[in-house]
Image (spheres, rainbow, N blue to C red):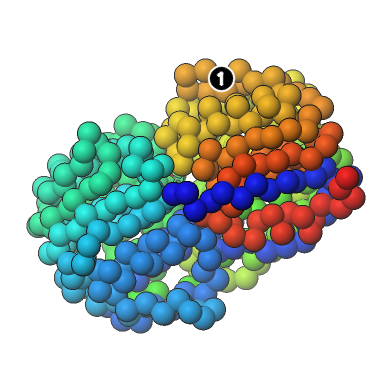
Amino acid sequence: MGAHVTVEVVSPATRFRAQTRVPGDKSIAHRALILGALAVGDTELGGMPDGEDVRATAECLRKLGCELDASGPIWRLRGSGLQAWRSPDGALDCKNSGTTMRILTGALAGGRVSGTLIGDASLRRRPMERVVEPLRRMGARITATDGKPPLTIEGTPLSGFNHDLPRASAQVKTALLLAGLHASGPTTVREPYPTRDHTERLLTAMGARVTRADGAIRIDPAGEPLRPLHLSVPGDLSSAAFFFAAAALRPGWTATVSGLGLNPSRTAVLDILREMGAEVEVRLEGDASIEPRGRVTVQGNGLRAVTLDPAQVAKAIDEIPVLLVVASQAEGVTRVAGASELRLKESDRLATMSEGLRRLGVPVEETGDGIAVTGPTALQQGRVGSAGDHRVAMALAVAALVADGPVSIDDATVASISYPAFYQDLGAAALGGS
Ligand code: S3P
């Protein structure tokens, strides 16, 4: 809030060649920390991202009494189980991170302590009834204000429940599984479209009983405490997507990212880039025991428009902003449907991306739950805003690479929510700017 004020000027590139690593996966990192704090024993996490969202989760856990050393390359966390969490001194500040707020709500619901979760101006606008309502069906005691933060949770014994979620949300699924871990009786979660499954993988690795049957995920209450986790967090595909999208913009431009998380529930963006005409090469390598990982190279090769359906949107939800930039350079009209969830992210991403792309000269049509982008368009230089949204700032920086002159991005340092060194890394890959 008010902390991000810098204007970033991104110049056009004549060539783009990235060979890089990206920060550790944010979704895995939030979960690994919270699950580590629910376990009993010493969790060790390598490759943790240095963005502000994950730091917010770490701070909340410290306030709940967890010992956490995040000063070196390996983060060490001493878990003593949920029942050892203590009531925090003051509110738990989730800052800009919806994942922190929703997942922690599920973890706290079945515990013994009370806590109030707060957030920044963006988070205070985001819907929380989607997590509060199903938790209440399990007996949780949570108060919200018109379904929005702050949330006050009074830990109480929970009962298992069969949830049929009206919308695809990995955060809500995770909250319910963590509540189910401490409930009496099994809990099941059915989602309309499959979402990222990091929680299921980590819980299983830590000894919980998580099974999938008939399209639903079931968790049985923990008979014994979770085992601590030893994990090297792979690179975040959602951060790498900005480099892959940049490479796709022009024939011959390339990006290679290694050490990258390649969980199949996250790789839809690569399939979409391939469908649009980019060359995508994936090589799995390294330890895949919990999360698959490897190296990906994307090379630009002419682009055609695509139509994305709601299932693809659910699987590539965080990559849609930068895919809209790719669409501006593709032949035809790219249509994204069933994407109203994008209006409820760090900003209303259908509105903020429409605005940003239009300012650069792209014909965009926004509908209630979707967007259509016509290409290819020669982008114009200009001034755009991030709307305080890290992914919008980074997507528009990628667009700037093919503009006819420099593009100024207001409030650009918001990228540090997920990727503090983004502009340096992008600049190192972009050659021959004006
Ligand atoms: C996330 C899930 C997604 C995604 C968000 C991170 C997660 O949200 O947009 O950035 O870590 O679980 P949904 O809960 O809407 O799936």
Position above or below: 268 against 76: above
The number of callouts visible is 1
Residue 39 in the image: state x and y as whole percent. Answer: 29, 73
The quarter of the picture where residue 277 lies is top right
Q: Nearer the viewer, residue 17 or 201?
A: 17
Residue at 60% from the left image edge and 37% from the top image edge: 385
Residue 5 in the image: state x and y as whole percent. Answer: 56, 49
Q: Amino acid at mark 1?
A: Glu
Q: Quadrant of the C terminus?
A: top right
Residue 266 in the image: state x and y as whole percent. Answer: 54, 49
Look at the image and tell me whether residue 221 can be seen.
no
In the picture provided, is 433 more to the left or to the right than 48?
right
Q: Nearer the viewer, residue 422 or 16?
A: 422
Residue at 52% from the left image edge and 43% from the top image edge: 389
Look at the image and tell me whether residue 397 can be seen.
yes
Q: The residue tagged with tag 1: helix, strand or loop?
A: strand
Q: Nearer the viewer, residue 328 or 426?
A: 426
- To which residue does mark 1 refer? 366
Residue at 48% from the left image edge and 37% from the top image edge: 347
In the picture provided, is 132 more to the left or to the right than 299?
left
In the picture provided, is 154 more to the left or to the right than 351?
left
Position above or below: 57 against 139: below
Residue at 22% from the left image edge and 54% from the top image edge: 116
Q: Mark 1: few, some, or many residues within 10 Å (few <14, many ≥20)?
A: some
Residue 234 in the image: state x and y as whole percent. Answer: 57, 65
The quarter of the picture where residue 112 lies is bottom left
Position above or below: 239 against 203: above
Mark 1 lies within 8 Å of ligand 1 (Cβ measured): no
